[in-house]
Structure formats: structure tokens, C-alpha cells
Amino acid sequence: MSSGDSNPAATPTPCPDTQGDNIWMSLHNRFVSDSKDKEPDVLFVGDSLVQLLHQFEVWRELFSPLHALNFGVSGDATQHVLWRLINGELDHISPKIVVLWVGTNNHGHTPEQIFGGIMAIVQVITDKLPNAHTLVLVILPRGRSPNPLRERNAQVNQLVQETVSSLHHASFLNVDPGFVHSNGSISHQDLYDYLHLTPQAYHAVCQPLHAHIKRLLEKPAAQS
């Protein structure tokens, strides 16, 4: 599906080097280089929620033993992940599972556009890694109180879940343990800036995620 021309969220785009430090491209090049020397069973790809996960004990405890690689980049939106995956990050590895966590940084895009961007990424993963299973994670709620971005994320999740449920090579997983309280608020003890996760929140998210990944790894490989 060629939606890139009309959908900026599904148009592969390198992240602008607004700080002049070339960090984004340096990270991408490092990921491509790392992929030539590693044989991961699980690949995590996405934005800062993926990148920061690598810094916590829960990564070493749960995901390192699964031979996991972390290709998360802070600030990435769907179009940036799309560009990275098209430009070499999947070319030298054959993971059994790709965990995709992206979408909350797609500022200025509609739920339908973000959904299109996520599905474009799923398609690229399928094209480059036909034997891999893509696990799309829920876009978490954000903001201390109810707000339009939280509503947008919820709409994206619904669209993705409905579409991915019919695919054999992908699935959707809601890893939100209930960050939104009954009064509509989110606690800074879970999301310290109402976007990024605290250590205890990562633990709450990653325990069921780890169990789900293990079940997928234990499944017989799908026949194409």
C-alpha cells in the first residue's frame, strides 16, 4: 500500500538534526554495525520507551537472557523508525520476534495517519523478515489528566488492534497495567513526567511482556 505520499507518518524520513550533534544518525549507524555481529532472537525497536528500557535492571533480568537487541531512539516517530528499518537495521539479523513500540511522538498527525505509519512498519518487517513475528505494543496513555494526546493514542490503539488481529505474522499486546486511575489521573510514581516510565512502571509493563515473548518463542515456527 503506497500511502507514503499522502501520509507523513508512513513516509520514511530521517530525524532532523536540530541540535547539530548527529546523534540520531550515529545511533542508526551503530545499530546497523551491531546487527552484523549479533544473532538476536528478539529485537526491540521504537522510541525512548524502548531506548530507556535498556538502562534498567529489568532489561538485564528479563530480556538479555532472551538474546534481545535494543534499537530504540528517543524522540522517534513512526516515519523515523520506518526510515531506519528500510536503511539497514534489519539487513543482517533474523530475529524470531520484533517488538514494536512507537507512536506517541507523532505530533501533528491524526490517529489514522499514525495507524498507517505503524502498519507500514509492520509491512517492512514482514517484507525483510518473513519468518519473524511482529509484536505491536499499546501506545501508553500520557499526561497527568485526560487530554487530547491521550485520546489520540487510544484511537490509534483501537485501529491497530482491530487490523493486527487478522494477521498471522503480527499481534497486538496491551501492556498497560492500569496507569490511569479511576479519576482519570496518572501518577508521577508510574510515569515520572507523565510520559516516561519509572523503574516500578517498567517492571509492571515488562513482566507480562516477558511472559508473552517467551510463549511466542516456544511456538513452532510458522510455515510460509
Image: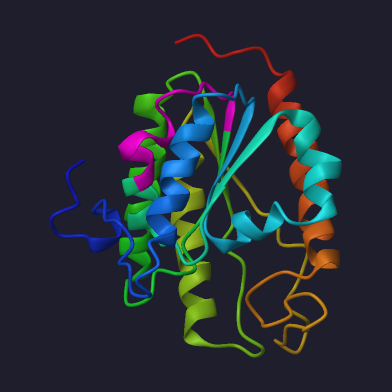
Residue 84, by quadrant, is top left
Residue 87 highlighted magenta (yes or no)? yes
- In the rendered image, residue 97, in percent from the top left (x then y), is placed at 59, 30
- In the rendered image, residue 195, in percent from the top left (x then y), is placed at 63, 76
Furthest residue to the front?
21
- Asked whether, in this view, residue 155 is left or right of residue 20, the answer is right
- Asked whether, in this view, residue 36 is left or right of residue 67, the answer is left
Q: Residue at x 52, y 59 (%)?
A: 47
Residue 48, by quadrant, is bottom right
Q: Residue at x 83, y 80 (%)?
A: 189
- Asked whether, in this view, residue 96 is left or right of residue 8, the answer is right
- Asked whether, in this view, residue 105 is left or right of residue 110, the answer is right
Furthest residue to the left?
5
- In the rendered image, residue 141, in percent from the top left (x then y), is placed at 61, 73
| Residue sitting nearer the eye, 183 or 71 | 71
Question: In which quadrant is the N terminus drawn?
Answer: top left
Q: Residue at x 36, y 34 (%)?
A: 88
| Residue sitting nearer the eye, 222 or 196 | 196
| Residue sitting nearer the eye, 152 or 132 | 132
Q: Which residues are magenta?
A: 84-97
Question: In which quadrant is the C terminus drawn?
Answer: top left
- In the rendered image, residue 148, in percent from the top left (x then y), is placed at 47, 85
Q: Residue at x 21, y 60 (%)?
A: 7
